[in-house]
Structure formats: C-alpha cells, structure tokens
Amino acid sequence: MITAHFLISQYLIIFTDKTLSKNIKMARKELSEKQFIVHRLSKTALRALHILGVTGAGGGILLNVPQEQWSTYWIMAMATGSTLMIWEIVRDWRWLIQLKGVLTLVKIGLLLLFIPLANYKPELLITVVLLSVVVSHGPSGLRHFSIVHGRRIGGKKEIKG
C-alpha cells in the first residue's frame, strides 16, 4: 500500500533533482558542478548556523534569560551573519544598493541600538526578525529594488543556499 509519506518523499526527491539540475546548468557557466555544489552546501550550512544563532540569542533576549546563557548563540549569529553579508558583497557589490542589502544594513543599525537602548532589546529584535522575513521571502522585485536607480536591477547569478 502506498502511503502519503512515500508519495511526498518521492515528489520531494524528483522536485529537488530537477531544481538542482536546473541550478547547476544555470551556474555551470561560471562554476564547475563540484564548485557549485560546494558553494551551495557552504551557504546552506552558514544559513543554518545563522538561524540557530538567531533563535538561541533571540530566545534568551525575549525570555529575559541571563546573557551568559545565550551569548554563544549571539556570537554565532553575528559571525555567520557577517560572513553571509561579506559573501554577498564580494559576489556582487550591487547587493549594497538593492533593498535586500539596504535592509540588512538597517538591521545591523538596529542591533547596534541594543547598546544605548538596552531596555528595548525585545522590540528591536522583533523588528530585526520581521525585516529578515521581508528580505528573505519578499517578492524578487522588492528584494532587487535599487535605492539608487529607483527600479529593480539585476545582478550576478546567485547561488541559493
């Protein structure tokens, strides 16, 4: 008997294979298949560690847990976030003038406000998380909107992760 779990897993395998094949073909112009896979897995691992750091530090901040209990997560979030940001800037400097880059810089500014506005850390954190959702899941036209050009601009081919 075929179960729903089996059908879903088969669909995911087929979908993943087609998507990966398409991405490899699109990125192959610049990278070999092995390089593409290494870049993709590296970026995915960085994002996973970043999310782990954000959730650990965020939980500590929102639940008013003593800082020494979540500071490792904070360091993880800042280190991986900085690395992902540098990755994007090195890949294509236009990231800095696209809304996804601008909003990332705004998030850094909000995080810097943790120092003078320590009593507002939960509110600042919630704002940062909501901006992150817009940057990650907003429509392409919004994320790629250039504040300099006043319109959507393209950039170099991204390797998702």
Image (cartoon, grey):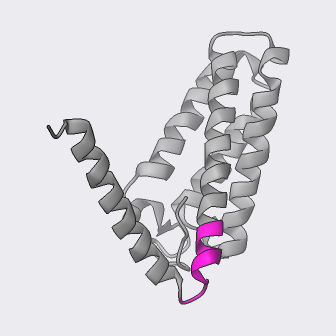
* Quadrant of the frame with the N terminus: top left
- Looking at the picture, does residue 45 appear above or below residue 157? above
Taking depth in this image into account, of 152 and 27 the one nearest to the observer is 27
Using the rendered view, name the quadrant where residue 83 is placed. bottom right
Using the rendered view, name the quadrant where residue 100 is placed. bottom right
Q: Is residue 30 magenta?
A: yes
Residue 119, percent across and down?
72, 15
The main secondary structure of the magenta stretch is helix
Residue 53, percent across and down?
69, 34
Residue at the image point whose x is 55% and y is 69% from the top? 159
Q: Is residue 115 left or right of residue 129?
A: right
Q: Is residue 141 left or right of residue 157?
A: left
- Res. 52 in view: yes
Q: Is residue 88 left or right of residue 127?
A: right
Residue at the image point whose x is 31% and y is 60% from the top? 15
Q: Is residue 72 magenta?
A: no
Residue 141, percent across and down?
38, 65
Using the rendered view, name the quadrant where residue 114 is placed. top right
Q: How many marks?
A: 0
Residue projecting furthest to the bottom: 29
* Magenta stretch bounds: 29-38
* Quadrant of the frame with the C terminus: bottom right
Residue at the image point whose x is 72% and y is 36% from the top? 111
Q: Is residue 21 left or right of residue 6?
A: right
Residue 153, percent across and down?
47, 76
Taking depth in this image into account, of 144 and 50 the one nearest to the observer is 50
Residue at the image point whose x is 62% and y is 76% from the top? 34
- Looking at the picture, does residue 45 appear above or below residue 114? below
Residue projecting furthest to the front: 1
Residue projecting furthest to the left: 1
